[in-house]
Every structure is written in C-alpha cells, then in structure tokens.
Amino acid sequence: MSALIKTGYGARIRCDITADKAAFNIPSSTVVKATLISLDGDRVLIPSVTCSDASSGADWATSKVMVEFNEAETAAVAEMGGANIELQVDGTADTPWTLPVLVQKGHPS
C-alpha cells in the first residue's frame, strides 16, 4: 500500500531502501535528498528536501530514511493521485530509489 500525503498537512513517510535486495548502512555524514515527483517523472511536485538521520523513525544503519514534507510544501501540490518519492543517496548509484505515494486534497481548516 502506498503512503498518503494530504495537501496542507505535514507528511512523515518512512522509506526502507535496499541495495541488492538487502538493507545497507548509510553513514550519518551522507546527504540524502527526497523529491516528490509525478508518476511519469516529468514534473517536480515538491522540490528536494534534505533528510536527517536524527529524524524520529529513521535508522540509517539499516537504510530506513524518514522523508518529511512540511505543511507549506504539501499545500503547494496541485496534482492529486499517484506520485513518487524519489530518494537520492550521495555516494550510491546514479539511479535514485522511487517509492509510490498517494496525494489527496486535505480538508480546509
């Protein structure tokens, strides 16, 4: 099942990534960036944010990364439906990891 992002609300999504089907250590000095992109990869819906190894729920020793988008970032997303989180981990393969998410319009407050 895909993670859910509701526009106008903060989103915290744990991404478990693997290399050769196994978890791996991401050194704490590594830069990990997450971008929300359209399903076809043609449009950036939320520009890159830097992930932190200190985020609650993250465990970089076992390649568990927490992606956090704030309320303003999700509020700016106009496309609803399927999308992908693209994770780029410096020092790894040029091909980023992609994880499916579902974007839904949040209720106005």
Image (cartoon, rainbow, N blue to C red):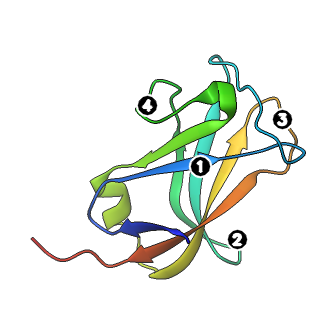
Of mark 1 and mark 3, the one earlier in the sequence is 1
Q: Nearer the viewer, mark 1 or mark 3?
A: 1
Left or right relative to 58: residue 93: right
Front position in the image: 68 or 40: 68
How many marks are shown on the rendered structure?
4
* Mark 1–mark 2 distance (CA, rounded to whole Å): 18 Å
Q: Nearer the viewer, mark 3 or mark 2?
A: 3
* Residue 46 horizontal/vertical position (percent): 49, 59
User: In the rendered image, which quarter is residue 82 located in?
Assistant: bottom right
- Mark 4 and mark 3 in contact? Answer it, CB < 8 Å: no
* Mark 4–mark 3 distance (CA, rounded to whole Å): 21 Å
User: What residue does disc 2 label?
Assistant: 41
* Residue located 64% across and 16% down the image: 29
User: What residue does disc 4 label?
Assistant: 55
Of mark 4 and mark 3, the one earlier in the sequence is 4
* Residue located 84% across and 51% down the image: 95
Q: Amino acid at mark 1?
A: Cys
Q: Nearer the viewer, mark 1 or mark 2?
A: 1
* Numbered mark located on residue 27 in the image: none
Front position in the image: 80 or 1: 1
User: What residue does disc 1 label?
Assistant: 15
Q: Amino acid at mark 4?
A: Ser
Report helix, strand or loop for mark 4: loop
